Image (cartoon, rainbow, N blue to C red):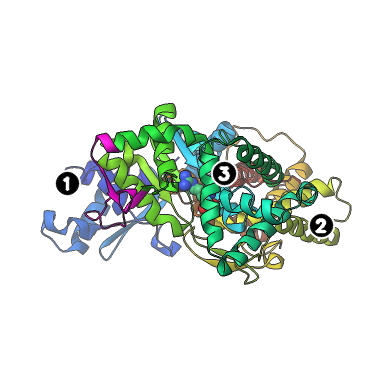
Amino acid sequence: MDIKQIYVDALTPIVGEHLSKEEITKLIEIPNNTEHGDLAFPAFALARVFRKAPQQIASDIAEQISMENFESVEAVGPYINVFLKRENVANELVTQVLNEGEDYGDLNIGHGEAMTIDMSSPNIAKPMSMGHLRSTVIGNSIANLAEKTGYNPIRINHLGDWGTQFGKLIVAYEKWGDEEQVRKDPINELVKLYVEFHERAEENPELEDEARAVFKRLEDGDQEMIELWTWFKDESLKEFQKVYDMLNIEFDSYNGEAFYNDKMQAVIDELESKNITKIDQGATIVDLEEENLPPALIKKSDGATLYVTRDLAAAIYRYNTYNFAKNVYVVGNEQSVHFKQLKAVLNKLGYEWYKDMTHVPFGLITLNGKKLSTRKGKIVLLEQVLNDAIALATEQINEKNPDLANKEEVAHQVGVGAVVFHDLKTDRMNNFDFNLKDIVQFEGETGPYVQYTYARSMSMIRKYDKEISKDTTVNLNDAFSWEVIKKIADYSRILENAIERFEPSLVAKYVIQLAQQFNKYYANVRILNDDDQLKARMALVKAVTIVIKDALKLLGVEAPEEM
Ligand code: ARG
């Protein structure tokens, strides 16, 4: 149910000659101050057509509006403010939510078409960083939103399992590595070797040449190199899997960069046959001067391919395999030039679908002021962060609800949920620092606050201990329930914006506001009081639990029933 639509339908017979339904919808405002009505229409938008003072137009229109769905209609200056018949809206909306359950809010913007989402994509032989956490949780939430809005989401983990860094790693391992050590503690040992390589290479630049030569051998399929690489990769995947399990996130594909090794020659041939490439100091490049971009480096002078070459092969493969309507890359903002180059080259190749590719960038986050850099060896291990959050959640639960039955499970849901929610609640482009103590809190604009609101509503439903009929008459008209009802009615509009802008933060902000409005209701109205509106209030509580749970699910955050 869409509240705006009620007003659009009422205005259309009066101004429909001059404004389309879409235009009317866009013009209608939701006043911040509730005294200015539930909805307001700016009559000055029609000043040109009617050639009258906006105040006059406002009062003329106000007189003609059918009162069927409105409590009152007021022309105030150039605005026509309307107050809806709360009981009608409450009843229709809550009935709808209870009947549709978790389908409430569903849209069909995607018409079942595929949306490929390149997400997480950590690099082998390195720990997963907070940056990869961002890509994982933002990507997962976009995928959930895509499904909710009618797309078929395909989660792709484009693993960084290829490239010159593997040359470096193999050189370091062969020179200074110890097999047993690596077997015992793979990621840490490999990172140490990688760090050591960079330290030594500062003194001895020849190491870089060695690394390039080794990577070339890997690309050419040298057995010994492949064995080492496979070993590093398997160990890394085991580590990544631990984090994915904690987050409860699955992928449809783990085709990383190496997967495209045998698909790149075809791309290079195509680029050459279409005369798009140039040779520059022995390297093959695509000049992008006209596009105001640095040239895309396709092949080095030694024949080794590059990141962009693999992404070209990957994009073409994805198009041919999934026939995507949208191909989304959830990757840090520092790679925005890379994705511009990628699209520019595909455009030159004549692939119209390059327009359906979107880089969804995000800012940097730091933990307690610490930046993440594997090269210098300052690492914040994601698994550690999540475990710390779980420990903090356990403390909170021990304090607030020591007798909780499934404490460990709930602490996991709350701790991990807090980190995920915090990551998603700020506009994705913002850089921010965070501190675990502040976010694993049951108060404030946190994940646990929303989860706690959900658990509290569920406990009310348990206490009520009666069937909540889907067809309850919801004759509520007080100011507190009205705010909750308007929020619930806004759900699918938020989802539409969120998927269009690839911005899960809109959903996170929305669910915080819904929880806040509901808590105000709870503080001001005795919900469980045994009077003739009890059933109606409980139906509203039930509707709130449905929407909170669904919104949290879209964010990838669980909703414990008790905490
Ligand atoms: N592995 C890369 C990194 O950690 C991200 C890959 C993003 N996806 C892509 N198709 N380029 O920086």
What is the secondary structure assignment of the residue under circle 3? Answer: loop
The residue closer to the viewer here, 219 or 336, is 219
What is the secondary structure assignment of the residue under circle 2? Answer: helix
- The residue type indicated by label 3 comes to Asp
The residue closer to the viewer here, 368 or 518, is 368
Q: Which of the numbered marks, if any, corresponds to residue 425?
A: none
Residue 159 image-quadrant placement: top right
- The residue type indicated by label 1 comes to His
Give the residues drawn in magenta, as a range.
272-297
Q: Is residue 106 magenta?
A: no
- The earlier-in-sequence mark between 3 and 2 is 3
- The earlier-in-sequence mark between 1 and 3 is 1
Q: Is mark 1 within 8 Å of ligand 1?
A: no
Residue 200 image-quadrant placement: bottom right
What is the secondary structure assignment of the residue under circle 1? Answer: loop
Q: Residue at x 66, y 66 (%)?
A: 378
Badge 1: residue crowd in 10 Å (few <14, some 14–19, many ≥20): few
Please name the residue that numbered disc 3 is placed on.
161
Asked if marks 1 and 3 touch (Cβ < 8 Å), the reply is no
Please name the residue that numbered disc 2 is placed on.
394
Q: Residue at x 67, y 62 (%)?
A: 380
Instruction: Tell me residue 269's x, y (percent).
Output: 32, 34
- The earlier-in-sequence mark between 2 and 1 is 1
Residue 41 image-quadrant placement: bottom left
Q: Is residue 303 left or right of residue 185?
A: left
Q: Which of the numbered marks, if any, corresponds to residue 18?
A: 1
- The residue type indicated by label 2 comes to Thr
